[in-house]
Amino acid sequence: MRELIRKILKEEVKDGKVICDGCGWSWDLSDGGDDKYMCHKCGHDNTPKPQSNFHKILERAKANFPKELHGKVDEIGQFIVDYIKDHNFNVKFLNSCRVGFSGVRTKNEVIICSPNSMTTLGDFIYTIFHEIRHEEQIRDLKMSNPLTDYDLEDFEKLSEKYWEMELDADQYAKQMIAKLVMNFKFPMDVSKQNFKLSEYIQNYPSMSKMIRQQLQAIVMSIIQMKKSGEEFTDISDHPMVKNHLDKLEDFI
C-alpha cells in the first residue's frame, strides 16, 4: 500500500535512475536522450510532477515524525486528497497569515490560510475538515447560510444558527482527526505530539462569546456595505476575504 501511494504522489528518480511508474523498467537518467523521462518500453511519461501546496506541508510535517512513520503520513495525505476529490470540494491555498482567519468557506471555494504557521499537523488537518464541513452543511445538507439567508438585523437568530454550524464543524473535524489516528495506527506518544490541537481549537466550544463578538463586527460591516451600495452576495465579497482572492493558489 505504501509503495502504491508513493507512486501516486510522485514519479520516482533514484540514484540517477528513472524507475517507470507504468511498468517498473528503469534506466540511467543520463541515457534518456531528449526524452529523459519517457519509458521506451511502455511509453509512459515519467516526468516528475511538482509537489502540491498540500504535499509540501506534509513533507515538512514528516520532520517531526520518526522515519518509520513517514509512510503513514503519506497515507493520511492520500486519504485527504481522495476525500476532497471524491466530494468535489474546491480547496484553495492562501499563503498569508494576516487576514484574520485560518480557513473560510466561500460560495466558490474553501480557503486554507497560512498552514505553515499552524502549530501542528493536527491543527492543519482540523482546519481542512472544519471548513469543508461548512461546505457540506450548505451544499449537501442544504443548511441556510447565516450571512446571506438570514435577516442581518436579527442578530440573535443569525448568531444562534452560526454557532450551531460552528459547533457541528468543530466536532466533525475533531472526530476526523481521531479516526485518522486510530485507523492508521499511530503510536500514542507520536499522536500526542503531532496531532495535538492548539489550546484555541481544543477550547473552541467554550469560545461562543468571543466568536459572537467577531461575528457581530462582520455583520455590522456587511450592513454598512449594503447601505453604501456595495454588493454582498457572499463572504467572498467582504474585504477581509475579497482583498486576497487574487492570491489564491491550488491546494492539491
Image: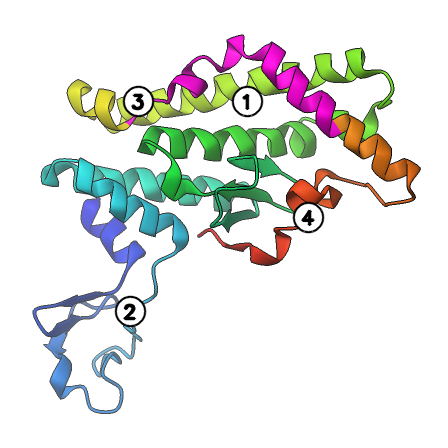
CA gap, disc 4 and disc 1:
23 Å
Residue under label 3: 196
Q: Is residue 12 magenta?
A: no
Under mark 2, the amino acid is Pro
Measured Cα–Cα span from mark 3 to mark 1? 18 Å
Disc 1 marks which amino acid? Ala
The magenta stretch spans which residues? 195-218
Task: Name the N-terminal-most of marks 2 and 3.
Answer: 2
At 25% from the left and 64% from the top, the residue drawn is 11
Mark 4 to mark 2 CA distance (whole Å):
34 Å
Question: Which element type, helix, strand or loop, lies under badge 1?
Answer: helix
Give the alpha-carbon distance from disc 2 to disc 3, as whole Å.
33 Å
Circle nearer the N terminus (4, 1) = 1
For mark 1, does the 10 Å Cα neighbourhood hold few (<14), some (14 to 19), or many (20 or more) residues?
many
> What is the chief secondary structure element of the magenta stretch?
helix
- Mark sitting on residue 86: none
Above/below status of 174 relative to 234:
above
Mark 3 touches mark 4? (CB < 8 Å): no
Q: Secondary structure at mark 2?
A: loop
Question: Horizontal and vertical percent for residue 140?
Answer: 66, 31
Q: Nearer the viewer, residue 242 or 20?
A: 242
Task: Read off the residue under disc 2.
Answer: 48
Asked if labels 1 and 3 touch by Cβ distance under 8 angstroms, the answer is no
User: Whole-percent x and y of residue 200?
Assistant: 44, 19
The quadrant holding residue 126 is: top left
Which three-letter amino acid code belongs to the residue tagged 4?
Lys
Q: Earlier in the sequence, mark 4 or mark 2?
A: 2
User: In this rendering, which labeled residue sits more in front, label 3 or label 1?
Assistant: 3
For label 4, the residue is: 242
Q: Which residue position holds label 1?
A: 169
| 51 sits to left or right of 87 | left
